[in-house]
Image (spheres, rainbow, N blue to C red):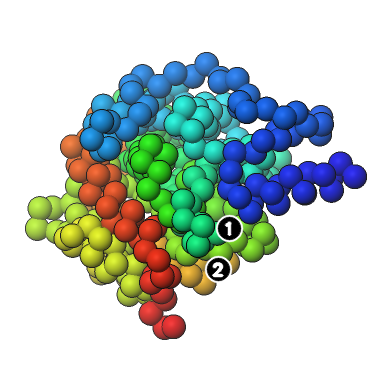
Amino acid sequence: MKKLFVLICISTFLLSCKTPEVIINSNGSSARTNSYPSKEQVTPSASTKIDANNQASRLSIEGSLNYLASDALEGRQTGTPGIEKAAIYIENVFKENNVKPYFETYRDSFNIKDIVGYNIVGCLEGTDPNIKNEFVILGAHYDHIGTSKEVNGDSIANGANDDASGTVAVLEWAKYFAKTKSNKRSVLFTLYAAEEMGLKGSEHLAARLKSENIDLHTMINFEMIGVPRAETEILAYMTGYEKSNLAKTLNEYAGSEIIGFFPKAKEFRLFMRSDNYPFYEQFKVPAHAISTFDFTNFEYYHHVDDETEKIDFNHMTNFINKMIPALEGMINTPSKEIKMNNE
Ligand SMILES: [Zn+2]
């Protein structure tokens, strides 16, 4: 009976993607309330709001990244106290900006042997009754590898670029759409654990959402967007570029070519190597990764020096803001225009 009750509540949330009016307590009972559980005392060091011009601010980006990539989080390895701090931080950003939990809480939990991992999933319900049952998923992985080969007494792999940068980008877009309420489709803001253990978090979430049969329009995963490419190159590239019309469509809404084709992404099959892939596998809809890391512009992949000091915040701010009209256009277009190219 308890289980049935939980199922009914969950299905209500799924249909509406709204603030659950009924919050299920840990003992399975319920309480009608308009507020979320009290905030944990993890305070961002910078503004957590989008700025007055509806642009992501460098201050906010730097504040979030500084925290997520700090030594206090010990490299955010899945199952450790360090990643738990990151999870709480992400939940707090969602709460403070009125981004709702998609499930009964923000956490989508899964097990890898005796380790418990948590994807963090926030939702903004679409504003158009005709298409709000269609979902766009924006994601990044917030876990990292914990420690790596010691250099000058430092063994913490902070993962500033990989992938605190993508995580921060997703948080900024969550803040943007929460403030502007300009998403006609529903949007899930998803931060994955256990990417570094083999895409375990995204595999779990993609399978769960598939089992619930959500109508997924498209999914974009952001990986290592913290350093710029050479000036002669397009701002970012998309993995699986030729598999769908997503990059072309994003560029149209952006008003310039900000997402390009990168031959090495194809050569190294990067399409299959990050958290977009499980969504493609489950749904067979466009699900790609976008990155500005091109193997020539960052020497610290899985290195203890992947730290905040190596991040170019002007670039990150520029990238995040240039993506806003691209995402907004894609989220709001009335028809399902993003398609696999073989359809
Ligand atoms: Zn990564």
Q: Quadrant of residue 106?
A: top right
In the rendered structure, find residue 87 and report the number of the disc placed on it: none
Q: Residue at x 51, y 48 (%)?
A: 125
Q: In which quarter of the image is residue 113?
A: top right
Q: Where is residue 104 in the image (x, y as percent from the top left)?
A: 67, 40
Q: Does the residue labelled 2 lie within 8 Å of ligand 1?
A: no
Q: Which residue is drawn at 82% across and 44% down?
A: 5
Q: Is mark 2 on a helix, strand or loop?
A: helix
Residue 175, placed above or below residue 12:
above
Q: In this view, does 34 lie to the left or right of 176?
A: right
Residue at image mark 1: 206
* Residue 112 is at least partly visible in this image: no
Which residue reaches farthest left? 232
Q: Which residue is drawn at 52% across and 45% down?
A: 123
Q: Position of residue 59 (x, y in %)?
A: 26, 27
Residue at image mark 2: 283
Q: Where is residue 32 in the image (x, y as percent from the top left)?
A: 72, 30
Which residue reaches farthest right? 1
Q: Could you tell me the amino acid type at mark 1?
A: Ala
Q: Answer whether labels 2 and 1 touch (C-beta < 8 Å).
A: yes
Q: What element carries label 1?
A: helix
Quarter of the image with the C terminus in it: bottom left
Relative to the observer, which residue lies in front, 270 or 286?
A: 286
Quarter of the image with the N terminus in it: top right
Q: Position of residue 148 (x, y in %)?
A: 42, 36
Q: Could you tell me the amino acid type at mark 2?
A: Phe
Which residue reaches farthest front? 129
Which residue reaches farthest bottom? 342
Q: How crowded is mark 1: few (under 14 residues within 10 Å), some or many (20 or more)?
A: many
Q: In this view, does 327 lie to the left or right of 204?
A: left
Mark 2 or mark 1, earlier in chain: 1
Residue 133, placed above or below residue 56:
below
